[in-house]
Image (cartoon, rainbow, N blue to C red):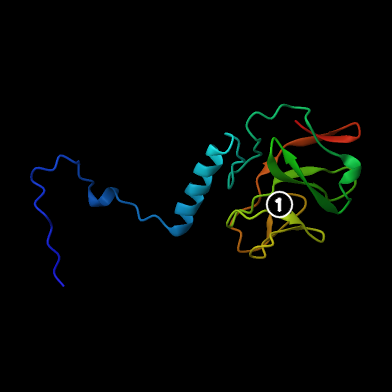
Amino acid sequence: MTHTRPDRSADTTPSVPPEAVHDVTRRELLRGAGVASGALVGGVALVACSGGAEEPAGTSPGAVVVPLADVPVGGAVSAQIDGQEVLVTQPVEGEVHAFSAICTHQGCTVTPGDGDLACPCHGSRYALTDAAVLAGPAPEPLPEVTVVVEGDDVVTS
């Protein structure tokens, strides 16, 4: 089958050189759409797949996330920070962490598992201490949200 191009001699649209075109993968497209939609929902989103601790926009230090007594030793509890789902873990007594509950695979909500964090959609599992990927298909650890223990509460820092 032969394709012919229409005469574009009068077209003023700038052309894009072939070397500037990047083939977007389905994953990149969906990830970009997720970031864009997250930016549209209240302007607050946890940044996924980044290297350091990430805070939801507008989080003030000292905001209570959950009472420490609600976080099981060797486990985790679901909570929210500024409307964003997080998981607060206590791998050993007195050691507390918080992570985004948004799976780095396809954005499902990760839940407390049996001694780990589990994504119910495709089976990814994350460590309680650093949210490292224990089982895929998740490509990255969950982003950490900085928290500390103050008195009887886990609070943002």
Q: Quadrant of residue 86?
A: top right
The residue depicted at 71 percent of the width and 26 percent of the height is 60
The residue depicted at 90 percent of the width and 46 percent of the height is 93
Judged left or right of residue 30, residue 109 is: right
What residue is shown with label 1?
131
Judged left or right of residue 28, residue 13 is: left
Nearer-the-camera pick, 154 or 81: 81
Judged left or right of residue 1, residue 128 is: right
Where the C terminus falls, by quadrant?
top right
User: Which amino acid is tagged 1?
Assistant: Ala
Question: Which SS class for mark 1?
Answer: loop
The residue depicted at 13 percent of the width and 57 percent of the height is 5
The residue depicted at 82 percent of the width and 61 percent of the height is 114
Q: Quadrant of residue 115?
A: bottom right
Measuring from the top left, give residue 91's x and y in whole percent: 83, 51
Q: Find the residue positioned furthest to the front.
A: 41
Q: Find the residue positioned furthest to the bottom.
A: 1
Nearer-the-camera pick, 135 or 79: 79
Measuring from the top left, give residue 103's x and y in whole percent: 63, 54
For residue 134, above or below residue 146: below
For residue 61, above or below residue 113: above
Measuring from the top left, give residue 83's x and y in whole percent: 69, 38
Where the N terminus falls, by quadrant?
bottom left
Measuring from the top left, give residue 143's x and y in whole percent: 65, 45
Mark 1 burial class by Cα count in 10 Å: few <14, some 14-19, many 20+ = many
Nearer-the-camera pick, 54 or 58: 58
How many numbered marks, from 0 up? 1
